[in-house]
Amino acid sequence: MTDLWWKSSVVYQIYPRSFADADGDGMGDLRGVIDHLDHLAELGVDVLWLSPIYRSPQDDNGYDISDYQDIDPLFGDLATFDELLAGTHRRGMKLIMDLVVNHSSDEHPWFVASRSGKDNPKRDWYWWRPAREGMEPGAPGAEPTNWGSAFGGPAWTYDKETGEYYLHLFSPKQPDLNWENPEVREAVYAMMRWWLDRGVDGFRMDVINMISKVLPLADGRLTAGAAYGDGSSSYINGPRNHEFLREMHDQVFAGRPGMLTVGEMPGVTVDGAIKFTDQDRHEVDMVFQFDHVWADRGADPWQLIPLRLTALKGIFGRWQAGLAQVGWNSLYWNNHDQPRVVSRYGDDSPEHRVAAAKMLGTVLHLHRGTPYIYQGEELGMTNYPFRTIADFRDIEALGQYHQATVQEGRSPEEVLTVLRARGRDNARTPMQWDDSPHAGFTRGEPWLAVNPNYREINAKAERADPGSVFHHYRKLIELRHEEPAVVDGDFTMLLPHDERLYAFTRKFQTTELLVIGNFTGETVRAEIEDAIAWEEAELVLTNVAEPTGLTLQPWQAVVYRRSM
Ligand code: NOJ
């Protein structure tokens, strides 16, 4: 039988530029990660996922790669990487790399060759198209399709020298690779094998459900007031996606058991995910989907929709049921693209932050799937108090702000309100290690401001405090390692219509777990069947000093266990 070790594992995501800076240049680096491996080993995580550390012009903080087989000097070099890998393995953890191959940097030699002339052998490695028929090349609106890019502006950039446009679903410095070309695929697979030969344990694959495009490339739907059309139906879950991933599996992973593959897939459906992660199809091990982090997003991107707990439960319930027999999901609240969950779906006030962070962690980790912890989540780190647009560094925030305010006529304050709540820089402020200047992240000037709450919220204080968020996360990981019902138990949602409590059971052989999280600052009684009997069962985990059975205190979580 295949060894599906990752089902009982917990992954920890490191965003290297914000994790720990050893050389004092204000930017995190690989030596900084090495210096803090014991923090991760103490937490008990099984796998480290490193956001990109390859050579890169850093237009999108490394998600724009100019050399897939070297380390950016900002972060260190290959020798330091090997040391990090060895240190990770020595502590019994695995390490997976971020694979960004929907696009490369425009400074990658592949693209430099491709743009150098229409006859260049690498021309077809990227998506080149002439101007829209009948339009003057380079004129406004002459782009080959009406698609907008993720970071604002059109998805096409005109290249004067050759008189054609190239496609970039993200920034103009991230041209999309043409996966229709077999030479592109072979080059990517060779690069992946090179990393596996070096000893890495797998890959998290960036927007991997965008690599196959619907041909011919055609205009997307244009909604009133929007500057660009929505091209997503031409590149999300495209027609050859499964085929490409199967080929990648055969070319890269066959004969290398025990590797982990995670497909980041915005817009993937439950049915799609079942196919992508069915072990018999040999595509990927698990998906990273977005439905639950888009639960507070409306049709208008510049409106904040308060979270409805019933909607969130509906989403999780659908995914849990869909992947119950075949397939596997990732479980996450946070990553480098999301705001901090305790500020988003919890309560980051001094009164409730600790309880809310623990409750959110408990509810997530007790689902079926592989949990991910994003750096600082184990401390209950919060969103940053951004004031003006000048406080942001993220290319997405800056690009979207420009498009919304200048091209679409939105008011700056309206846009800022959403960026403060949702902006990706919330996740990217430096890791808070201790209460020394800059939170012990750097002895230089940090590239992005440290959250002023670091004197209260930091790793040193939390490791020393048995009641901290850190130790609660440690227990959650331990529970997954020890209790098979957490890994394999059947999932049943309770109280689906309740806006205050999130409740479910997990059943495996003779064990049953009951999990309840109170998503409010009030005391709430859980009116479930069997409440009295449950109150007499074993309370495995909670986050309050004096538990009161199924009468849940503000932001309380409980995990009960009984034998059936
Ligand atoms: C998804 C990554 O998580 C995000 O940070 C990045 O900007 C885009 N893909 C483009 O690579």
Image: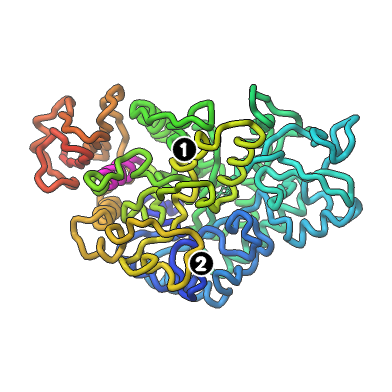
153 left or right of 26 in image: right
What is the number of the mark on residue 70?
none
User: Does residue 257 show up?
Assistant: no
232 left or right of 350 in image: right
The picture places residue 546, in percent across and down from the top left corner, at 9, 45
Q: Where are the magenta residues, as a range?
A: 356-368
Residue 194: image quadrant is bottom right
Residue occupying the point 49% across, 44% down: 423
Is residue 357 part of the magenta span, yes or no?
yes
The kind of residue on which mark 2 rests is Met
Is 549 placed above or below 2 here?
above
Q: Residues within 10 Å of mark 2 (few under 14, many from 20)?
A: many
Query: Which secondary structure, mark 2?
Result: loop
The picture places residue 69, in percent across and down from the top left corner, at 65, 67
The picture places residue 20, in percent across and down from the top left corner, at 44, 67
Quadrant for the C terminus in the image: top left
256 left or right of 334 in image: right
The picture places residue 130, in percent across and down from the top left corner, at 86, 39
The kind of residue on which mark 1 rests is Thr
Query: Which secondary structure, mark 1?
Result: helix
Is 215 placed above or below 452 here?
above
User: Does residue 48 show up?
Assistant: yes
* In-front residue for pair 57/543: 57
Tag nearer the camera, 2 or 1:
1
Is 236 placed above or below 341 here?
above
Is residue 445 part of the magenta span, yes or no?
no
Residue occupying the point 59% across, 58% down: 62
Q: Main secondary structure of the magenta part?
A: helix
Question: Mark 1 — residue?
Answer: 417
Residue occupying the point 85% across, 33% down: 132
